Image (spheres, helix red, strand yellow):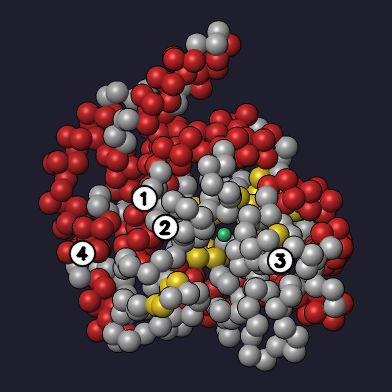
Amino acid sequence: MAIEKYKLEEINQQQSNDHKRKFEFVASTVKNVEDVLQKLIDFQVAIPSWALGTGGTRFGRFSGGGEPRSLEEKIEDVGLLHQLNQSSGAISLHIPWDIPENPNAIKALAAQHGLRFDAVNSNTFQDQADQEHTYKFGSLQNVNKAIRKQAIEHNIEVIKQGVELGSDSLTVWLADGSSFPGQLNFRKAFQNTLESLEEIYAVLPDNWKMFVEYKAYEPNFYSTTVADWGQSLLYATKLGPKAYTLVDLGHHLPNANIEQIVSLLLMEGKLGGFHFNDSKYGDDDLTVGSIDPYKLFLIFSELVEGMDARGMNHATDLGWMIDASHNVKDPLEDLLQSVEAIQIAYAQALLVDAKALEAVRESNDVVAAQEILQGVYRTDVRPIVAEARLRAGGAISPLKVYRDLKLRQNLISTRGLKTVTTGL
Ligand SMILES: [Mn+2]
C-alpha cells in the first residue's frame, strides 16, 4: 500500500509555513546546517522484519490488526515507513521467520520500494518444527557435536539466503549460556562456540561482515557465552578482519557506560553495527529514545567523533538497525518514533563543536565540557530533521500523515483485524 504523492504533499503544504519559521530560526543558530542536512538525508536505519507486528511478552500478545501476513507485506510496510520518512531504506530479515521463496521477486519488490537488504539474522535460539536436534542446552556451544553442526549449517544457509538478496552481513546472536552454576564448563563453551563461529566465518563471502552480538543475560540467567563487549571483541579478534562486535543498547547490565564502549570499539576498528532500542530495566526493547534520550545523544556523540577520527562514512561504514518490539503501540507508529529519535540524536551529535570540546578537555574545564554537550542536547533540532525529510521527498511530520490518512485502518481493511505476524 503506497501513499499517493499528492496526498502527502497536501499535508506537507498545511504545515509548510509553520515548519519554515521553525527551521529558519534553528538554522540561523547552526554553523553547518547544509552539511547536517545532507548527512541526515544520507543516513538510513534498517527496519527488522520482526518489529512490524505487535510484539509480545511471555505473558501474552495482543495483535493490533492489519499486521503483515507474509514477507511481501513486511516489505510493503517498510516501504510505507520509508515513503514517510525517507530514512528507513533497508530491511533486516530473520531466518527462518522470513524465508524468501522467490529471492528475485522479493528483491524486485524491495527495489520498487527503494529498499535494500541489511544484515540477515540467524536463529538458533528456538527449535523449528522440522529440526532434528534441540537447542535447549545451546547451539554453537553445545557439548554435542551433531547439535553444533546443525547450528553451523543453519548459519551457512542464512548466508546463502542473504547472498541471493544482496545482503552483505550476518548477525549472529547467541542465546547460548547456562541458567545454573555448575551447568557449564565456561572454557569449553567458549572454545566450542569459537570453533563453530570459525566454520561459519570460513564460508563468509569476501565482501561480507559477521556481527557478533552480545547480551548480558536472558534467556539464560546465570551465564551467557557472549555476555559482554569484551567477550564479543575476543571472538571478533580471533575470527579475523571480517568479524565485528555489534552493540545492542538493551544488552548491557544496568547503567553500563555504552558511549565509552562504543568509543573504544571504534578506536580498535571493531565496531560493526548497532541495534537501537531503549530500556528502563533490562532488554526491554522499548521505542528508541523513549526512556533516556540524553544517553542516546551521548552515544551518538561518541559515534560521530569516533567515526570522524577514523575518516569513516557515517551512513555506510556501520550497520544501523532498530531492534525493538513491544506490545502496546501500533508497530509502524512506534518505528516512526524510533527513527525520528535516532535522527534527532544524530543531528545533535553533528552539532557538537568537537574542536571546542577537545580544547576545554585539554585545560580540564569540566564545567565548559558539560555546557558544550548540554547546550547542543537542549537545542530543538526537530525542524532540521523535518527539513531533511522534506528535501528527500518525505513528510514534515510522518506520524501526522500516517494518522490523517488512516493508514492502519487501511491495512486492517486489506489484511484483516486478526492477523499475527511471524516473530517474537
Ligand atoms: Mn539485537
Q: State which tag comes first along the sequence, 2 or 4.
A: 2
- Report the Cα–Cα distance between label 1 and label 3: 34 Å
Q: Position of residue 207 (x, y in %)?
A: 73, 57
- The total number of labels drawn is 4
Q: Is residue 66 above or below residue 17?
A: below
- Point out which mark residue 290 bears: 1
The secondary element bearing badge 4 is classed as: helix
Nearest the viewer among 251 and 415 is 251
- Alpha carbons under labels 3 and 4: distance apart: 48 Å
Where is residue 74 drawn, in percent x and y?
Answer: 44, 75
Q: Residue at x 44, y 80 (%)?
A: 421
Of the two numbered discs 1 and 4 in the rendering, the one whose residue sits closer to the viewer: 1
Of the 4 image quadrants, the one containing the N terminus is bottom left
Identify the element where label 1 is drawn.
Answer: loop
Residue 180: mark in rendering: 3
Q: Is residue 368 above or below residue 202?
A: above
Which of the two discs, 1 and 4, labels the residue nearer the N terminus? Answer: 1
**C-alpha distance separating marks 1 and 4:** 20 Å
Q: Quadrant of residue 29?
A: top left
- Under mark 2, the amino acid is Leu
> What residue sits right under mark 2 in the picture?
286
Q: Residues within 10 Å of mark 3 (few under 14, many from 20)?
A: few
Seen at 35% across and 78% down, the residue is 63
Pointers 1 and 2 in contact (C-beta within 8 Å) = yes
Q: Is residue 286 above or below residue 353?
A: below
Task: Specify the amino acid type for callout 3.
Answer: Phe
Query: Which badge, 3 or 4, is on the more N-terminal residue?
Result: 3
Q: Which residue is mark 4?
A: 403
Q: CA distance from mark 2 to mark 4?
A: 21 Å
- What distance separates the C-alpha of mark 3 from that of mark 2? 28 Å
